[in-house]
Amino acid sequence: MIENFYSKCTISKSVLFLCLIFLPYALNQKYYDSRYDYYDIDHLVQNPRLLKKYLDCFLGKGPCTPIGRLFKQVMPEVITTACAKCTPTQKRFARKTFNAFRRYFPETLMELRRKFDPESKYYDAFEKFVIMKSVIVLSCLLAACLAADLSKYENFDVEPIVTSDRLLKAYINCFLDKGRCTPEASDFKKALPDTIATNCGKCTEKQKANVRKVIKVIQQKHSTEWEKLVKKHDPSGKHRADFDKFLLGS
């Protein structure tokens, strides 16, 4: 009995010892090996020749550098999980690299897709991951640029527009893609979809007053064109009621 007890203890100690050895490794598997997170990814994505070497490595058509070999090992899981175990730096690397693959080697990228996702189960989700950050960044940049552009019109005098039907029509034709745009009209045209969708949410109080003044005159004098503008920038009509309430504000 005593021998049996010691035997069980020995087994338990062995199991515990193995757990202590492998537990840190298991915990570290939340993310991939980060030893190459310092890698200069911008140098890679700006160098088509080097990009092609990595693609050839991933496809088994050429030799792999140590870093290329590591990337190749995790590639199947990266694609099937949309980079779920990637560190933030690795996610940025993946997005930049695959966007560069698409730009320079679209046909070879399709070959890579077939190799690692032959049944096309996962790549669409992975591609959304790749594109997502680019779209968000681009949207933020556009919003920032637009806000910066419109800030210079804080003291813009709308009286000449609302008192001159000829000038008012010129702005309307610009907004409807029926005529040429002045630099100011072009900026206002860019802002119009967001203005309608957000009830002028990014406008200052002064800009809100100017928007109300101009649109009310358009509604009164050119109601048909106003309806066309609304349909152009809010085809489903989901923002119409809220925007009408905004126009009624003081």
Image (cartoon, grey):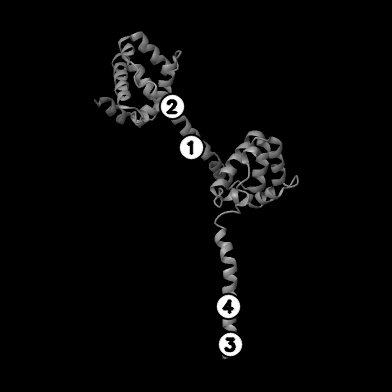
Which is nearer the N-term, disc 2 or disc 1?
A: 1
Q: Which residue is mark 1?
A: 136
What's the amino acid at mark 3?
Answer: Asn
Residue at image point 32% right, 18% down: 214
Which is nearer the N-term, disc 1 or disc 4?
A: 4
From the viewer's perspective, tell me whether residue 104 is left or right of residue 242.
right
Q: Which residue is mark 3?
A: 4
Q: Which residue is mark 4?
A: 13
Which is nearer the N-term, disc 4 or disc 3?
A: 3
What's the amino acid at mark 1?
Answer: Ile
Residue at image point 58% right, 77% down: 13
Mark 2–mark 1 Cα distance, whole angstroms, equals 15 Å
Q: Residue furthest front?
A: 38
Examine the rendering and report whether any part of residue 232 can be seen: no
Which is nearer the N-term, disc 3 or disc 2?
A: 3
Residue 138, position in %: x, y? Answer: 50, 33
Element carrying mark 1: helix
Q: Residue furthest left?
A: 250
Mark 3–mark 2 Cα distance, whole angstroms, equals 78 Å
Residue 217, position in %: x, y? Answer: 29, 16
Q: In the rendered image of this protein, does residue 194 appear above or below residue 25?
A: above
* Picture quadrant of residue 208: top left
